[in-house]
Image (spheres, helix red, strand yellow):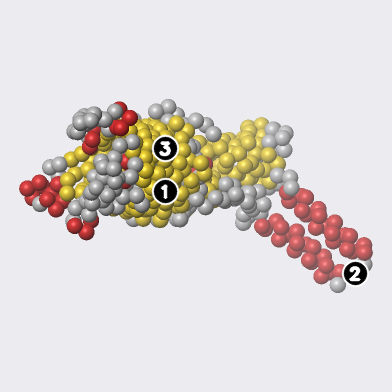
Amino acid sequence: MKSILYFLIISLISIKGLSQDTDLLKGIADTTKAREYVTGAYKSTRVIMSQSLEMLKPGVLDFRILHRFGNINQGISEFFGLDEATIRLGLDYGITKNLTVGIGRASFHKEVDGFLKYRAIQQSAGSGNVPVSLLFVGGMTMIGESWSNKDPEPEFKHRLGYYFQAIIGRKFNEIFTLQLNPTFLHRNMVPTTGDPNDVFATGIGGRLKLSKRISLNVDYYYVFDQPVSYDFHNPLSIGFDIETGGHVFQLHFTNAAGMNEKVFLTETFNDWLNGDIQFGFNISRSFQLGGKKKK
Amino acid sequence: MKLKTLFFITGCILITGVGYAQDRYFTKTGTIRFFASTDLENVEATNQIVTAVLDIKSGAIQFSAPMKAFEFKKGLMQEHFNENYVESDKYPNSTFKGKITNNADIKYGTPGTYDANVEGDLTIHGVTKPVSAKAKLNISAKDIEAGTSFTVLVADYNISIPSLVADKISKSVQINVTTRLEPFTR
């Protein structure tokens, strides 16, 4: 009996000695996973038309050139719409990792727009995990072109529009992200008395990552308060994001004429089912101005 | 069982436990810096939460570095590093498992600076390759400062650099490790 006990003791000592070789890190490395914020839900800060749930890193300046061509169904005489182009030039800047400011000007209506985008909640995994990101966007638009109807002449305030949007979204996995964009828009002036000044719409957008640098993006709004004076259709855009180091290219097809919230939520006359589709491409180029602030 | 025998056995087990732990030195705040810069771009990052363990009896040494903790000056570079190059969602940690081949020459009880030859397996991006390096151990009464510097090839670890940015990222990466290891007491 005693010899068995001694044998057991000796084997215990030697077993402990052996385990040193297998994994030294066991018992030292943290077993509880620290909170990890989820990033990379989209390749850029726009889905296609809408703001996405991605923010710019602090100190990053994003130069955006958006092009929208004419309707493809105009045929070869208009070179399938490529002869007509409208453009929006914009600059977005990341103030902090949760606050972005942006300004832009579109050739359509010579409209200037500006916005502030704030991320209230960022999706995170690990300890204290949060399943979604919550963001808010507040923006203003101003028509720059001279009035076509000057009888009576509208006032300056009639050039303005305001919008407020919440973004609730989730990066489900490396491949799939989905978000909802409930939006409220107010225009100070509308074409006829029947058209609503206040518009409520819900956007839904998402992306499917096809490879490390390419994704398929879809962006759609259902507009509840549609204009009555013309044939309005809900805007829908479908396209590809191609990321190449510092640039992100967004090649897409859409029925939406405008490139800011006020225009695409109130002035989309084109109908996908009619083939009134326009080709567009957005280029986003990021520059790091000033270093990242140390956390 | 006789009480005496029980105490004796328990005593042996306890002694074994305590003796074993004193052989290990560790840190959870080790620093690893890497440089893959070219004339066109400054590609460098620092990770300050590297875990490292050294067993002074056997010379076995292990490192684990969480890839998402490599901090770059340019936020976009950090995002691309994680998303496109090392794919840190798939491979969250890089690890090194190896040993000091001349461990017998190192007198851990005597403070001083010692040269150590380290050999082992480095795993990055799911690929394991053998590496060897010369390290310096600065042993004092309370801790061991261990540091080393070595070079690896990006392509060895299945990390592809697209031709568009080939001139901006160096094909070989210099890795600097700086740690201050303290005795592991449970």
Mark 1 touching mark 2, by CB under 8 A? no
Separation of marks 1 and 2 at Cα, in angstroms: 75 Å
Q: Which mark is residue A138?
A: 3
Q: Quadrant of the N terminus of chain A?
A: bottom right
| Mark 1: secondary structure | strand
Mark 1 on the same chain as mark 2? no
Q: What residue is drawn where x is 47% and y is 33%?
A: A96
Mark 1 on the same chain as mark 3? yes
Separation of marks 2 and 3 at Cα, in angstroms: 78 Å
- Mark 3 packing: few (<14 Cα in 10 Å), some, or many (20+)? some
Mark 2 touching mark 3, by CB under 8 A? no
| Residue placed most toward the observer, B100 or B61 | B61
Residue matched to label 2: B1
| Mark 3: secondary structure | strand
Amino acid on which disc 2 is placed: Met
Amino acid on which disc 3 is placed: Gly
Q: What residue is drawn where x is 89% and y is 64%?
A: B5
| Residue placed most toward the observer, A233 or B70 | A233
Q: What residue is drawn where x is 29% and y is 32%?
A: A159
Q: Which mark is residue A213?
A: none
Residue matched to label 1: A182
Chain of the residue that carries numbered disc 1 in the rendered image: A
